Image (spheres, helix red, strand yellow):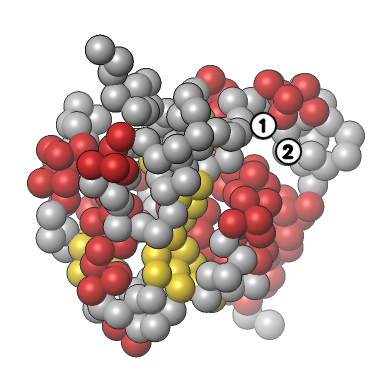
Amino acid sequence: MGLRAIFEKLKNACVRYEDTHNFTCDVCGCEVFANERVCDDCRRHLPWNVAPVCPLCGRKVGEEGICLDCKQKRLAVGKARSPFLHEGEAARLVVRFKRGQKYLYRTLCDFLQPVFEKEFSDADAITFVPMTEKAEKARGYNQSRLLAEELAKRCGRELIAPAVKQHETKAQKTLGRKEREENLKGCFHVRERKLVRGRRILLVDDTMTTGATASELAETLLRAGAANVDLLTVTSVPKKDPFGKKE
């Protein structure tokens, strides 16, 4: 056995160990004793995205019904769901994950998997939001792909990468939904249509803010022949006035 094969074997053994062993809570850092990645106390206090939620975009609303954004213009995804609101420790977990704490993909998938099994068990394949080569090199990894890979492995679905991001887009932090839509227009391209044609696809990402990125990618996949595209994210930004401001 060559050195490369030996190192690869050691690497795989380390990954398997990390998959099954955890000694501290990934939120508060306290010691845990049953391999859980988030302790019971932190789990109880996470900002769960519980009903009522908009049946289309899945964001928290004040009462049952479709939110104003979706009434005005639906996202291209069939439906979107997220286990958490983008607040408190859930938001901090996502930010830590995006800023270098790569190992948190396992923790976040612990919360994505039950939502998949409840809402998206009919999905044929799982995909992710592609990044440009420059952006992925700068970050060191594509956080959306890490989540999609782990979820696909756990749920026994095919991971597909049919789309590419053709050009870099400007930062979207300060942009509203319409500005984001304009910023993203035409940035995705499906290079392998056979991977999506006629299939029900689940798109996985870390956070849904306005849904513009997921909607643009979903439109691209649907034009390439996908039967349906749904969205699963770790967190979603709740609407302050989901049904419009009252007079």
> Tag 2 or tag 1, which sits nearer the N-term?
1
Tell me how many marks there are: 2
**Residues packed near mark 2 inside 10 Å, few (<14), some (14 to 19) or many (20 plus):** many
Above or below: residue 202 compared with residue 232: below
Secondary element at tag 2: loop
Which of 102/115 is in front? 115
Q: CA distance from mark 1 to mark 2?
A: 6 Å
**Residue 137: where, in percent of width, then height?**
31, 52
- To which residue does mark 1 refer? 26
Residue, x 48% and y 24% (percent of image)? 62
Residue, x 30% and y 15% (percent of image)? 246
Which of 201/146 is in front? 201
- Farthest-out residue, front: 247
Q: Is residue 84 shown left or right of residue 176? A: right
Q: Amino acid at mark 2?
A: Arg
- Farthest-out residue, top: 247
Q: In what quadrant of the picture does the C terminus appear?
A: top left
**Residue 57: where, in percent of width, then height?**
40, 45
- Farthest-out residue, right: 33
Residue 76: numbered disc: none
**Residue 44: where, in percent of width, then height?**
73, 25
Tell me if residue 48 can be seen: yes
Which of 184/95 is in front? 184
Q: Amino acid at mark 1?
A: Asp
Secondary element at tag 1: loop
Q: In what quadrant of the picture does the N terminus appear?
A: bottom right
- To which residue does mark 2 refer? 37
Above or below: residue 195 compared with residue 238: below
Tell me if residue 145 can be seen: no
- Kindly indicate whether the residue at mark 2 contacts the one at mark 1 (C-beta within 8 angstroms): yes
**Residues packed near mark 1 inside 10 Å, few (<14), some (14 to 19) or many (20 plus):** some
